[in-house]
Image (cartoon, rainbow, N blue to C red):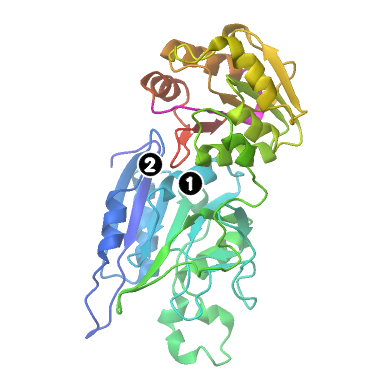
Amino acid sequence: MIKVECGVIVGLPFRQYKPGSPAGLVMPEWAVTLANLRWPLNTTVGWAPIKGMQTGDARQKICEEAIDIGAKYVWFIDDDTQVPPDAACYLIGTMKQAADDVIAVGGIYFSKGDPSEPIVYLDSVGQGAHWKWKRGDVFECSAIGTGCLLVNLELIQKLEKPWFKDLFHETKGWEMSNKTEGAKLNMTDDLYFCEKARAAGYKILADAHVICSHWDLRTGRVFDMPKGCYPDTPEREGVDIERALAIDGWMSKKELSWLAFQAKQHTKIAEVGSYLGRSTHAIASHTKGVVYAFDDWKGPRDNPDKEPATVYERFVKNTRNCKNIVMIKTDHAEAAPPINCDMVFIDGSHEYKDVRRDIERWSKFIEPGGLLCGHDFGEPGVEAAVKELLPNATLVPETSIWACRI
């Protein structure tokens, strides 16, 4: 067997179809999305399709074979579940930053029916679907559908086998769902796994960055998040970046929103390279703590059209309503915060030697578990330095921000 030190096996359990039913075909959209998945940096990926086997048994077999080759995670994608292209980046990023007792992280999809409801539960039996969450939330749940589920193989091995079992179909649950044989007999493989994992003391997370489409393969109808439902909000609740967007700079709206949300969770933040304050404002206006802004305010070296004489004054004007910014005018090579920080954002240079220097220097000033992140990953010098020094860093989807926990 070939051992893979750190990798993801994508498990594709193609469902069994009853004799006389339509063939087990997938939708074109499903296949196209699968071919265009984006992956975190330095991630080895393998594929494990299985067909003609009961779904619970297929999941069990996929996990066992992935463990045999030394993979770290299995990511289940069902043949009727269309995941967004950035799903792997979010699920793996969430798993890597989660507590050590998190055994699985799942994307959310909606049931095939009218009205459709999210297949995520705070109580696995009897309480119905959980609706009180927003796009972009990550929260603990008691059970979630396995159609888009990332599983930690190190932890699953500590559970008694089988890990997946479809009691509902094995006991002809569709004929007895209204009888009194007991809720456990009606468990599909997802509820079975979730209950076993939680009984052993492990946690399961739902990642609402990952909202999937759910196809009815017999009719060709797709079930998405219902319009106007509680979770259906385009931006994170409590994040307002309109004033930051009005400041000149290169940070996109998605990048500013991500920084603002991270700032809400941190209180000792350093920004290495602040320019006119576009990102500084987004961070400072959302943290309850302090932001140390490090810059020499001489303007970007690679853009001579920008007048350096007024950069400092413009920064002060742009951030004047943020009273929690401490400006530290210095060369990046000599910068050091007055205290260790729980978040550092590096955006001072695109040159390899500068970025490498900043990463090495600022890694020393972050508290254990703190967030180290930076901008402009698409720049060759930035990308080379990040890959070399931070192989576990992830790229925030649809942005050029890289991030990792120290």
Q: Residue at x 68, y 23 (%)?
A: 317
Please name the residue that numbered disc 1 is placed on.
90
- Amino acid at dot 2: Trp
- Amino acid at dot 1: Tyr
Residue range highlighted in magenta? 363-378
Q: Is residue 58 left or right of residue 176?
A: left
Q: Position of residue 150 (x, y in %)?
A: 46, 53
- Decide which of 284, 312 is in the foreground and name it: 312
Q: Residues within 10 Å of mark 1 (few under 14, many from 20)?
A: many
Marked residue nearer the N-terminal end (2 or 1): 2
Q: Residues within 10 Å of mark 2 (few under 14, many from 20)?
A: some
Q: Is residue 242 left or right of residue 113?
A: right
Q: Position of residue 51 (x, y in %)?
A: 26, 66
Q: Quadrant of the C terminus?
A: top right
Residue 81 occupies quadrant: bottom left
Q: Residue at x 64, y 21 (%)?
A: 315
Q: Can you say whether 240 is above or below 62 in the image? A: above
Q: Residue at x 35, y 52 (%)?
A: 10
Q: Quadrant of the N terminus?
A: top left
Q: Can you say whether 175 is above or below 121 in the image? A: below
Q: CA distance from mark 2 to mark 1?
A: 9 Å
- Decide which of 236, 49 is in the foreground and name it: 236
Q: Can you say whether 7 is above or below 279 in the image? A: below
Residue 27 occupies quadrant: bottom left
Please name the residue that numbered disc 2 is placed on.
39
Q: Is residue 363 visible?
A: no
Q: Residue at x 64, y 11 (%)?
A: 335
